[in-house]
Amino acid sequence: MKIIKYFIILSFALCTFSVRAQESLAAGIDYVFLQKLIDTAKSNYPKMKVFNHKIIIASSNIKKARLSWFDIFTVSAFYSPTYAQTLTNPTLSGFQLGLFLNISSMIQKPIMLKQSREEFKIAQLDQDEYNLNLEADVKSRYFKYIQQLTILRLQTQAALDAESLSKQFKYKFEKGEETFENYSKSMILSSDQRQRVIEAEGSVLIAKSSIEELIGKKLEDIH
């Protein structure tokens, strides 16, 4: 009955820790630090740099399309060193210049310029969309990290309580006041709690690594 009593007390304590975890999760969130993580991810994440380069290329294509208006004109120069004039083939000596207008090219230029501007807008919208997705991803991973930290703290406290309970049973068993069965159960409970702490520590490291993948830095380097 004593071991059952202790287990009931410990189970109640674990339930209390669970409630506290829900209450303290929001308290553990640092929104200023979170914004720094988001800004760092936008600066360092390779795919963000890809979108930046796409915008630069699209902007360059607009300038190229504007300058291509000069392509509709063709200037030709001819040089004739001698003067000869006949009824069938009159020629003049010296330089002769000719200016030609490409009508087909002139019609295509406004369409090409408009297309370049639309491509620039698409590149901007793609970047805006990815900005939102990246920000949401950083937030999600950060909240997961804080959740795992909170669970780790609670599991650590539960492990300490289980260890204290096991020591009490050991002391009473050695004095002959407790059975070996109850003492053995308390050791198993303590061992289970230590295992949960190890699992929680692993979850924290995984969550931390998941954030660092996006920001391109260690969390410790963000100030």
Image (tube, rainbow, N blue to C red):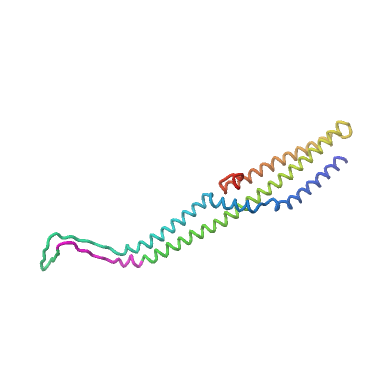
- Residue 99 on the magenta segment: yes
The answer to which image quadrant residue 196 occupies is: top right
Q: Please provide percent x and percent y for residue 167.
A: 81, 35
Q: Please provide percent x and percent y for residue 78.
A: 20, 61
Q: Is 7 placed above or below 68 here?
A: above
In the picture, measured across the screen, residue 177 lies left or right of residue 140, that is right
Q: Which residue occupies 71% across, 52% down?
A: 27
* Along the line of sight, the residue nearer the viewer: 153 or 162: 153
Q: Can residue 185 be seen in this view?
A: no
Give the farthest residue toward the front: 223
In the picture, measured across the screen, residue 7 lies left or right of residue 201, that is right
Q: Which residue occupies 46% across, 60% down?
A: 120
Q: Can residue 183 be seen in this view?
A: yes
Q: Please provide percent x and percent y for residue 158.
A: 77, 43
- Residue 53 on the magenta segment: no
Q: Which residue occupies 57% across, 56% down?
A: 133
In the picture, measured across the screen, residue 72 lies left or right of residue 82, that is right
Q: Which residue occupies 29% across, 66% down?
A: 101
Q: Please provide percent x and percent y for residue 194.
A: 73, 39
Tell me the quarter of the image containing the N terminus.
top right
The answer to which image quadrant residue 76 occupies is: bottom left
In the picture, measured across the screen, residue 125 lies left or right of residue 64, that is right
Q: Is 85 placed above or below 212 here?
A: below
**Residue span colored magenta:** 93-107
The answer to which image quadrant residue 84 occupies is: bottom left
Q: How many marks?
A: 0
